[in-house]
Image (cartoon, rainbow, N blue to C red):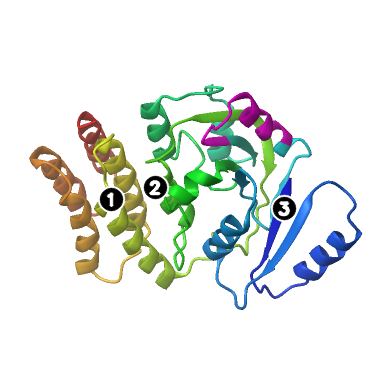
Amino acid sequence: MECVLIDDCGGDDSVKIAESFIQDYQGNVDFVLLHHEKNSGLSAARNTGIRAARGKYVYFLDSDDAITEDCIEGLVKITEDHPGIDLVLGLIDQDTPYMNQFAARAYPSYTEDRRYIKRALLDYDELPVCAANKMVLRQLILDNQLFFKEGIIHEDNYWSFFLAKHVKSLAVYPRKCYLYTVNPESITKAVNIKKEIYSSRVIIEDFCNHIDAFLKGEQKVAILSFLNWVLNGSYYEHEEQKEMLFKCLYDQCNWIEKQALCTWFSIASSNAKKTKLFNLCVRLFRLSN
C-alpha cells in the first residue's frame, strides 16, 4: 500500500509531523510526501495525488479526518473479490441525521446495474456525495479525465456528477470505516460569499452543458437540487444572475417541464406550495428517464 501526502503549504506544523513520522516508520506502507510551491486548494492536492499514485486504486482521505484500522483492508478485499470493480465506498462515522440515514440503508454488496449506480451517485440522499471514503479504479479516472475541478468549492458535488457518468460497477462496504472530524474552521463551514457565487455559477453551467442521454432526468433532478440550494442561500449577485442560473436548467427542459419549473421559480419564499412544485418538477424530470 502507498500513502501519498500532499503538502499544500498550510500554515501549521503538519508537514514536520508527517516527516518525523515517516522517518521513524518501519511498516509496509510506502510513504510519498509531495510539496506544492503554493497553496492551491483541495482539488489541486487531490489531482497531484492522483497523478503521482502508482497503485491500481486510489482512496481519498481528507487531512482532518481518520480511518479505522481495518478500513483499507475491508475495501481492498472487495476489489479482490470483484477484480476490476470501478468504485468501492464505505460508510462514514459522523453522528448527524444526514450521515445516519446511510447506515440504515440496505446496499447491494456488488452491482453492475448502471441505472442504480448512476441514480445513486447523483442522489445525495442515497449515497454520501463526498469524495472521501471512496476507493476508485485509478485507470477510470485517467481514461475519463475525472480530475477535480480546481478553483471552486463544492468540488465533491462537481466530481460526483461526472463520476456518475462512467462507473459501471459498484460495491458498498457496510461498515463505518471513515471517522469524520467536525472542524468549525474547515472550508465547508466558513462561508465565502464570493467563492459561493463563483462556484455555484461554474457548477450549474457545467452540469447543464454536460447532460448526457442516459438517465437525463436524474441529472436534471441533481441540477435542480443544487440550484434550489443556491437560491435558498442567495448565492448570486443580482436578480439577473439568479435568472441566468435558472435559465441554464430551463433550456434543458421540454415544454411541460418548463411550465412547472417557471411556476416553482416564481414563488419567492420557501413554503409548502413551493415544496410541492419542487417535487412535481422532480417527478416530471424522472419521467424522461
- The x, y position of residue 213, in whole percent, is 24, 38
**Residue 216 in the figure: left or right of residue 144:** left
Q: Which mark is residue 210?
A: 1
- Mark 1 to mark 3 CA distance (whole Å): 33 Å
Which range of residues does the magenta coloring cover? 73-88
Q: Which residue does the image show at 34% across and 63% down from the upper left?
A: 202
Q: Which mark is residue 266?
A: none
Amino acid type at mark 1: His
Judge whether residue 267 can be spotted in this image.
Answer: no
| Residue drawn at (52%, 61%) of the image | 43
The answer to which quarter of the image holds residue 190 is bottom right
Answer above or below: position of 24 versus 265.
below
Q: Judge whether residue 86 is colored magenta.
A: yes
| Percent coordinates x, y for residue 169 in the rendering | 48, 30
Q: Is residue 219 above or below residue 116?
A: below
Which residue is tagged 3?
3
Q: Nearer the viewer, residue 67 or 140?
A: 140
Q: Which comes sooner in the sequence, label 1 or label 3?
A: 3
At x 69% / y 57%, what residue is drawn?
Answer: 4
Q: CB of mark 1 within 8 Å of CB of mark 2?
A: yes
Q: Amino acid at mark 3?
A: Cys
> How far from the left and from the top, in percent, is residue 85?
54, 32
Q: Nearer the viewer, mark 1 or mark 3?
A: 3
Disc nearer the start of the sequence (3/2): 3
Query: As drawn, is 199 to the left or to the right of 176?
Result: left
Gap between marks 1 and 2 measured at Cα: 9 Å
Residue to which mark 2 is pinned:
162
CA distance for labels 3 and 2? 25 Å
